[in-house]
Image (tube, rainbow, N blue to C red):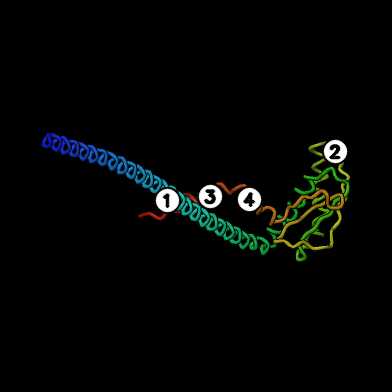
Amino acid sequence: MVAFIRQEARDKTEEIHVRAKEECNVEVLKMVEKEKAKLREHFKQQDKRVEIEGKIQRQKLVDKYRMELLKAQDAKKVQLEEDCRKALSKVTRDAGRYKAFLKNAMIQAFIKIWDEAEVKVSCRKEDANIVKELMSEALKSVVSRAKQECKEDLAMKATFEKTPLKCMGGVMVTARGGRVVCDNTLDARLKIVMKAELPYVRDKLFSAGRLVPKN
């Protein structure tokens, strides 16, 4: 009987030991899987963070390149405008050609604001004598054209504005105390051309093939 009880106790002990070991293994597996899940989530977040940071860095590089590109384009446009100014300065040196330009510039301005009764003509200091000389002739030409082409009797009166303009050349015609302005200076014409021809300039100077160096 004693031997039986002892055997029974040993069997129970073994059973408890086996069950405890199994339960321990189950808990260990649960803990391992839980930690694995945490690690997977951690590395997933890390990968996502690295990906986001990579996108941010790439965008910063793109923005930096675009800014440098815009600065380079602006510098090129400024240089182009300066080159044009130098070229236009040669126009004023050709006395005959420039005199004809001044007359035509006044005629164009008078026609543009032909319905004004009184206008003032301004120019740079160096051109004052020539403009005064041509002003009456230019006005007569406009009056004659108005009569012939539009059957209108133009009664415009043009006076010379003594205050000189700061410009490369050309004339500015104003009326109504400066509220009506026709700027026909070389500076104004250059601005118009630079704006109108900007798509062409961009295509020739800033196209991808010219900005990106070839390997």
- C-alpha gap between disc 1 and disc 4: 44 Å
Report the amino acid beneath label 2. Answer: Glu
First in residue order: circle 3 vs circle 1? 1
First in residue order: circle 1 vs circle 2? 1
Q: Determine which quarter of the picture holds residue 73.
A: bottom right
For discs 1 and 2, the disc positioned in front in the rendered view: 1
Question: Which numbered disc covers residue 54?
Answer: 1
Residue under pointer 4: 193
x and y percentages locating residue 74 in the rendered image? 57, 57
For discs 3 and 2, the disc positioned in front in the rendered view: 3
Disc 4 packing (10 Å; few <14; some 14–19; many ≥20): few
Report the amino acid beneath label 4. Answer: Val
- C-alpha gap between disc 1 and disc 2: 72 Å
Asked if marks 3 and 1 touch (Cβ < 8 Å), the reply is no
Report the amino acid beneath label 3. Answer: Arg
Asked if marks 1 and 2 touch (Cβ < 8 Å), the reply is no
Q: Secondary structure at mark 4?
A: helix
> Is 168 positioned to the left or the right of 44 in the image?
right
Q: Tell me the residue at 17%/37% (across/down).
A: 9
Question: Which numbered disc covers residue 152?
Answer: 2
Residue under pointer 3: 202
